[in-house]
Amino acid sequence: MSQVEGQDDLTRKQRREQARAQRKALEEAQAAKSAQRKRLIQLGGAIGVVVVIIAIILLATGGGGSKPAVAPKSPAANQATTEVTSLLQGIPQSADTLGKASAPVTLQYFGDLECPVCREFTLGALPTLINKYVRAGKLKIEYRSLETATREPETFRTQQIAALAAGKQNLMWHYVELFYHEQGEESSGYVTESYLQGLASQVPGLNLSSWSSARNDPAFATQVTTDAQAANQAGFNGTPSFLIGKTGGSTQKLEYSSLTDPSSFEAAIEKQLKA
């Protein structure tokens, strides 16, 4: 391995560790608040004590926050397909881009498909942005790959390429959104070939044979690498991260205050529209 490749590898590892550290800090803060509530309940008597004990057991066994990936063809998968289809219906897609090519503002969204924080954005602020700006032809969103949450680099490449391959049929955003809706527990190893195939089978209109062939296109592996380089140049070490700017012009970091409340994204988009 060359020195540059070693440095790139180290950077990816550092990014993953930094992202995990941030999520761990958030989880610990939430756990501290939960513990305080439990102590108050404990004062209420025996019932409160039982509740606290049950909660501690659940957390110790991983039952407090773990969730399996959604199984294909299950009611939850069918519901996710309905929600994603409704959200994206009638909006043009081209490769990794959602929205009209003529949209005056471009948002570049750097994400890891296994990132639970990206999932917060997908289920929180993103639908409002799509309905208010993308559907209206004012904004287009370009999806970029940045490894932060996925533990194995090879798994990361495989899952991101699976999404990019759907983009060859202009259905990448269906695949990406379904992945986030049906995401499993981070680092649980849920991303298998069966899982990726199951997502593809849910994308309306996706030709599975063509999709499978497209996954072998070396251009997609190159794109994943190029996206990571662009993220490094922008100084990003976590996901989701965003660049925004006039279409065809320079971009700048979008600093958001919440991933569930779209207000900070709306303010940034409006600023670009008025510029």
Image (cartoon, rainbow, N blue to C red):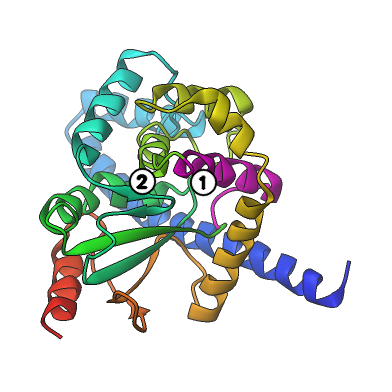
Q: Magenta stretch containing residue 248, yes or no?
A: no
The amino acid type found where label 1 is placed reads Leu
Tell me if I can see residue 167 in this picture. yes
Q: Residue at x 44, y 18 (%)?
A: 72
Question: Which quadrant holds the N terminus?
Answer: bottom right
Q: Residue at x 36, y 80 (%)?
A: 251
Looking at the rendering, which quadrant does residue 41 occupy?
Answer: top left
The amino acid type found where label 2 is placed reads Arg
263 relative to 27 in the view: left or right: left
User: Relative to the observer, which residue lies in front, 233 or 185?
Assistant: 233
161 relative to 236 in the view: left or right: right
Q: Residue 119: give its label.
A: 2
Q: Residue 97: give its label.
A: none
Q: Residue at x 65, y 42 (%)?
A: 155
Q: Is residue 115 above or below residue 72?
A: below
* Residue picked out by circle 1: 164
Circle 1 SS class: helix
> Is tag 2's residue or tag 1's residue first in the polypeptide sequence?
2
Q: Pointer 1: residues within 10 angstroms few (<14), some, or many (20+)?
A: many
- Residue 63 at what x, y percent from top left? 44, 28
Q: How many marks?
A: 2
Q: CA distance from mark 2 to mark 1?
A: 18 Å
- Residue 197 at what x, y percent from top left? 54, 24
- Residue 229 at what x, y percent from top left? 59, 72
Q: Which residues are magenta?
A: 148-168
Tell me if I can see residue 31 in this picture. no
Mark 2 or 1: the one toward you: 1
Q: Is residue 256 above or below residue 159?
A: below
